[in-house]
Amino acid sequence: MHLPQPLFPVGGQPIIWHQIKALSNVDGLREIILIGFFEDHVFQPFLSKCQDEFPEVSFKYLREYSQLGTAGGFFHFRDQILRGGPKNIFMLYTDICCSFPLGELLAQHERHGRLGTIMVTKVERSSAHLYGCVVVDHETRLAEHYVEKPETYVSDMASTGVFVFDQEIFQFMARVMEKRAIEFEHQRAQESAYGRSDDNDGAQDVNRLRLEQDILRAMAADKKLSAFLCTGFWRQIKSSASAVPANALYLQQAATDNCALLAQPRSEGPEITGAVYIHPSAQIHPTARIGPNVSIHARVVIGPGVRINDSIVLDNVHVKDNAAVLHAIIGWDGRIGRWGRIEGSKITSADDIDEVTHSGIKLNSICILGKDVQVKDEVFIRNSIVLPHKELASNKHNEVIM
């Protein structure tokens, strides 16, 4: 509730850090610009750390003061983006988790010479309607058609929210905006003739630019968009339920890459299974059993006999003796009493659940404890969401606790 989603930690780092890390590995990439609605000071500490960690890249945050659509901010800040004279421009949404094969994406983009390249991933036919779908010519790699969340089956190739454009993309967007302005003016003239004109709504709509419906669809129609197939992992992070499986994917990638970020088993304990991140300031009792797919953050204290599996434990949490945390997020400053049990339902990549509640009813997904939640000894919290600053002295199952 107090942290922008891009800064929420998965895989031991903020969501957006994984994108920045992947971008920093692209040869010749010089500048990374964040565009968002938050005040400048919200991202400044994070960007300062990134500047220290990736000194070869410059960082900038640009704030949208009104809702301009998924491409409106990109177009609005075109002068600042073009100031460094870039040949190609990556564009990434922040609510995704991915292996980010950006070097391969750029290589195909330059090889095919189209105005833009969209990275796609293959999804189950039954869930294709949940995504922006791309009809791809697999011989030419040309994106022939783009449909945002189609009602009927169109393709099993879904947009990943990762793109690379030639710097001339802004000229194409300007033509789209000009065409839209003419259409809106014509529409307003017709409405005015019938006495239904609303100048404020029209002005707001004409300045909104949607990447998917307005730009990608037009690029595909003009044969200016190629498609690159991502064969690595990808999933959306649309809600807190997505954070735990995203955490697992990033930790497993770190294990594959032999990353020093991960905790290593030691003969004196604790018992580490699979991919686990433990912050250096955390204190873990030697008899605890941690993993797989667990992130434990700063100043966490884990007591004797504790079992943690498939979970994210945030800063300053204290988990006391013999407690269990399974498929859950434990918010900052939380306390789990002795023999307590916090357990959600395991979410698999195939499920890809974006909701944790429906019509006020808790769905079967992870268990979430907000900031400063105190769980007393021997209390079982199962498949529930607990808002911040609550004290729980009795068992709760399938509840949203306000």
Image (cartoon, rainbow, N blue to C red):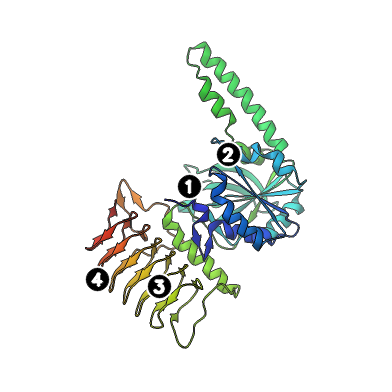
| Residue 4, disc | none
Where is residue 103? Give x, y as percent. 70, 60
Question: Circles 4 and 3: CB distance less than 8 Å?
Answer: no
The residue that disc 2 covers is 64
Contact flag, marks 1 and 4 (Cβ < 8 Å):
no
* Front-most of residues 128 and 377: 377
Q: Residue at x 54, y 44 (%)?
A: 39
Disc 1 versus disc 4: nearer the observer? 4
Q: Residue 223's spot in the image, x, y percent? A: 69, 42
Q: Which sits earlier in the primary sequence, circle 3 or circle 2?
A: 2
Residue type, numbered disc 3: Val
Q: Residue at x 56, y 48 (%)?
A: 41
Q: What is the secondary structure assignment of the residue under circle 3?
A: strand
Q: Residues within 10 Å of mark 4 (few under 14, many from 20)?
A: some
Q: Amino acid at mark 4?
A: Glu
Q: Which residue is mark 4?
A: 378
In screen coordinates, is 121 left or right of 115? left
Q: Residues within 10 Å of mark 2 (few under 14, many from 20)?
A: some
Q: Tell me the distance, in whole angstroms, between the alpha carbons under discs 4 and 3.
A: 18 Å
Label drawn at residue 301: 3
Precedes in sequence: disc 2 or disc 4:
2
For label 3, count other residues whose C-alpha is less than 10 Å away and answer few (under 14), some (14-19) or many (20+).
some
What number is the disc on residue 129? 1
In the orientation shown, which residue stands out farthest toward the left? 394
Q: Quadrant of residue 176?
A: top right
Above or below, comparing residue 116 to residue 106 in the picture: above
Q: Secondary structure at mark 4?
A: loop
**Residue type pointed to by label 1:** His
CA separation in Å, label 1 and label 3: 44 Å
Horizontal relation, residue 400 to residue 185: left or right? left
